[in-house]
Image: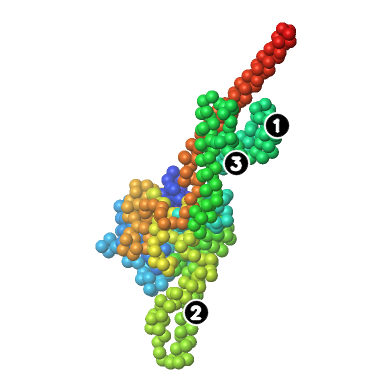
Amino acid sequence: MVVMAFLPMIRGCERYEPFAESLLFYQDRALTVRDFFDFSWTNMHKKSMNIWEDYSTQTGLQTANLATWSNWNAFFTAVLKHLQNSLNFTGYHSNDHFYPTSPSSFLSAKDGIDVALKNDVGLNLFATGIILEGSDYSKLDISVSIDTSALCIATPHSGYMSQGLVIFKSFSPVAWIFISVTITTLVMMQFIFQYSQYKLFHRLYTDAEADYFRETSSLLTVYAYFICGSPPSLHLGHLFTGKILFLIFSFATIIISTVFLSGMTTLLSDRVLYPEIDSVKSLEESDMLIQIFEEMNTETNFFDHLNQSEALRVKLADNLQYYRREMYGEIFMSIVDNWNKSDPSHDPLPAFLLNHKHFEMEIKEAEKNVRSIAETDAVLVSVPFSSRPPKNIRISPIVFLDHQWSEYHLMSECLMTYPLVFAFSKDSFFFDKVNHMMAQYFETGLARKILKADSASEDELELDVPYAENDSEPRAFNLNDLQSGFIGLIFGLFISFLAFVGELFFDYFQHLVTIKFLMRLKNVLFKRGRNTG
């Protein structure tokens, strides 16, 4: 019977999850811990150990160069040495190096196990992580499969949206508060002049002048009244502080808002940045596709583990690489047909290579009519396991046509491929020792040092690159850039408005008291005159 288990699920390792410290992994929910452990481990009846590694299936590590062969070999060497030291076993290796099957031989892990069984091999360690069927596992003590990578989706640092939604996306809550306060303040100011001061105007002006002002009052006439329409006999405010401050802040508000809103379309570039996508749910809801390296054959595993997400399946299927391969195939076949018709003995490949630039131009022109634009899409990458997975990565132009580096960040959810798979036979005491050894191996940080990515030679992937925003990136100028200044305008406008309104009402009541006093004085004088007469 075959037993398969991920390291975090193994008994005794619940306290430590070396593969999932800061990444969330998809796992098969149909499997339970009980499915993995229903054996009793009592003895070990074999005395020899053989390593059989089918490296040809490790396309994720081999082609993406996420762990070079030297690091990969050092990892298994360290595991073997620890097994030997802990269990006093003898292993099959030469000069501390394993001998994997040749990638060109296509020897499967199943065949390797069958060969090992025929030679009475006690322990078989292989690195494929695939489910093997048809082999007799009863003679095996343990079969370990270790994979040091995880499939992750890397998304661009910023996305883009159309210009039509900029009025809703660009303004921050502070900007909307600022605009609302400005409009409300101006309306209230006009209301004060038209209604609150109406009786006072009737006493200071003729009826015709008061009616004319009431009928024609607007923001323009109000400001004109402030600047040049106030008669010498009317003094609105003794200190004039509120009026002056409110006048300055109001004009600044109107001018800045008018210039900004009227120039919105001219200040914007063709595309506007929107927040980064860093969750699977956000990716499913977006129109972003998922690009795949042409050399990586990992999409099958990704489909198998994400069978619950049809939206991601569609994003993976509509891929630029498939489109490019199809275009190359059609162009190449057309050349073959043409050469076969003209000269069947001639090799069409040189002509294909000579016209490579022409074909690239045709493909690039055709891609303009296709949604798959690799520079703005997500990319499926294989990332090495470590205690702290990288946040920012830089991907080489393997899938791009413009030969430019692209900056990405990893999403929080990644796909755990086959981090650690155990296949135990019955009546073995090997479980606890291997379990403890592997947990200790990762916990002490040895795996982190050995599995450090060496991508400088291939220039395909850089991990933990510093991210700095590109100044030449399309970017909209919005109120967020002047947030502190507009907050100051809001407070200044509000405080000056309160001071100004206070002065207006103070002057209104003072003038009203003065008029009443003069009316009373007039009545008193008239009465005295009559009495004297």
The percent coordinates of residue 339 (x first, y second) are: 45, 88
Is residue 114 rendered to the left or right of residue 207? left
**332 shown above or below 483:** below
- Residue nearest the observer in this picture, 71 or 162: 162
- Seen from this angle, which residue lies furthest front? 533
Q: Label 2 to label 3, Cα distance in Å?
A: 69 Å
- Residue nearest the observer in this picture, 61 or 46: 61
Question: Mark 1 sits on what residue?
Answer: 207
- Seen from this angle, which residue lies furthest left? 95
Going by the numbered disc 2, the residue's amino acid type is Glu
Q: Which mark is residue 259?
A: none
Quadrant for the C terminus in the image: top right
Residue 491 in view here: no
**514 shown above or below 103:** above
Q: Label 3 to label 1, Cα distance in Å?
A: 22 Å
Which label sits in the foreground, 2 or 3?
A: 3
Question: Mark 3 sits on what residue?
Answer: 220
Q: Residue at x 41, y 72 (%)?
A: 106
Q: Residue at x 71, y 13 (%)?
A: 526
Going by the numbered disc 3, the residue's amino acid type is Leu
Which label sits in the foreground, 3 or 1?
A: 1
- Seen from this angle, which residue lies furthest top? 532
Residue 106 in view here: yes
Going by the numbered disc 1, the residue's amino acid type is Asp
Question: Mark 2 sits on what residue?
Answer: 330
Q: Residue at x 58, y 27 (%)?
A: 233
Disc 1 element:
helix
Classed neighbour count for the residue bearing mark 1: other residues with Cα under 10 Å, few (<14), some (14–19), many (≥20): few
**In which quadrant of the rendered view does residue 197 lie?**
top right
